[in-house]
Image: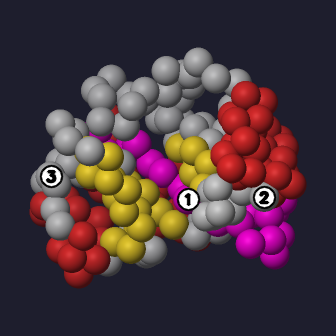
Amino acid sequence: MGLLTQTEVIETSWRVVNAVSVPVVVDGDTGYGGPLNIMRMVRELIRIGARGILLEDQTWPKRCGHMRGKSVIPLSEHVEKIRAAGEVRGDAFFTITARTDALEPLGLEEAIRRGKAYKEAGADFIFVEAPRSVEEIRKIAQEVPGPLVINNIEGGRTPILTLEELREMGYISIGYVL
């Protein structure tokens, strides 16, 4: 819903990073602006000890990935954001997950095209949000270079599969929210 600012996300991330002993990947939403905003966010997250960021290609304010009525920025704009994140990261131990929400507003083929472009731009993980069927999950895994991320949310649009089924298809980073 866009209630937090980039500064609030960074401050909260610092608290989490300092409270746990596991690597923390921060949901950077849309990055709170253009490539310069992304560069600042990545620089700050690396400074506080976070180990990664997830960046979405939705327009701002964003919506939950399983909601209707989403819209996405042009592919070229998100490619520039991913490149900016990679430039700042350098050789730091910091992962970049590129998420596309293009499936619902623009279709599966566009979501796959974006996944490929984001990987080429330097993303470590690709996340095509809210596949609506097992067939779409498989097609994404067959056509988008991995590693791939998927989430399973009770009541969401994506069919819930077992960890084993998803791993067999090529998804290695899997979030479960029950």
The residue located at (58%, 70%) in the rendering is 124
Label 1 sits on a secondary structure element that is strand
Between residues 2 and 123, which one lies in front from this camera angle?
2
Identity, as a three-letter code, of the amino acid under mark 3: Pro
The quadrant in which the C terminus is found is: top left
Q: Is residue 37 left or right of residue 177?
A: right
Where in the figure is residue 77, as x and y percent of width and height?
A: 64, 44
Vertical position of residue 15 compared to residue 110: above or below: above
Please identify the quarter of the rendering in which residue 89 is found.
bottom right
Residue 6 makes an appearance in the image: no
Query: Any mark on residue 49, and which?
Result: 2
How far is mark 2 from mark 3, CA to CA?
34 Å
Where in the figure is residue 3, as x and y percent of width and height?
A: 59, 18
Vertical position of residue 160 compared to residue 130: above or below: below
Q: Is residue 79 left or right of residue 172?
A: right
- Residue to which mark 3 is pinned: 159
Q: Is residue 22 magenta?
A: no
Identity, as a three-letter code, of the amino acid under mark 1: Thr
Comparing marks 2 and 3, which lies closer to the viewer?
2
Check if mark 1's residue and mark 2's residue have beta carbons within 8 Å: no
Comparing marks 1 and 2, which lies closer to the viewer?
2
Where in the figure is residue 73, as x and y percent of width and height?
A: 54, 36
How many neighbours does mark 2 have within 10 angstroms: few (below 14), some (14-19), or many (20 or more)? Answer: some
The residue located at (62%, 42%) in the rendering is 28
Q: Earlier in the sequence, mark 2 or mark 3?
A: 2
**What's the magenta region?**
86-104
- Residue to which mark 1 is pinned: 97
Between residues 141 and 121, which one lies in front from this camera angle?
141
Q: Earlier in the sequence, mark 1 or mark 2?
A: 2
Identity, as a three-letter code, of the amino acid under mark 2: Gly
The residue located at (23%, 81%) in the rendering is 168
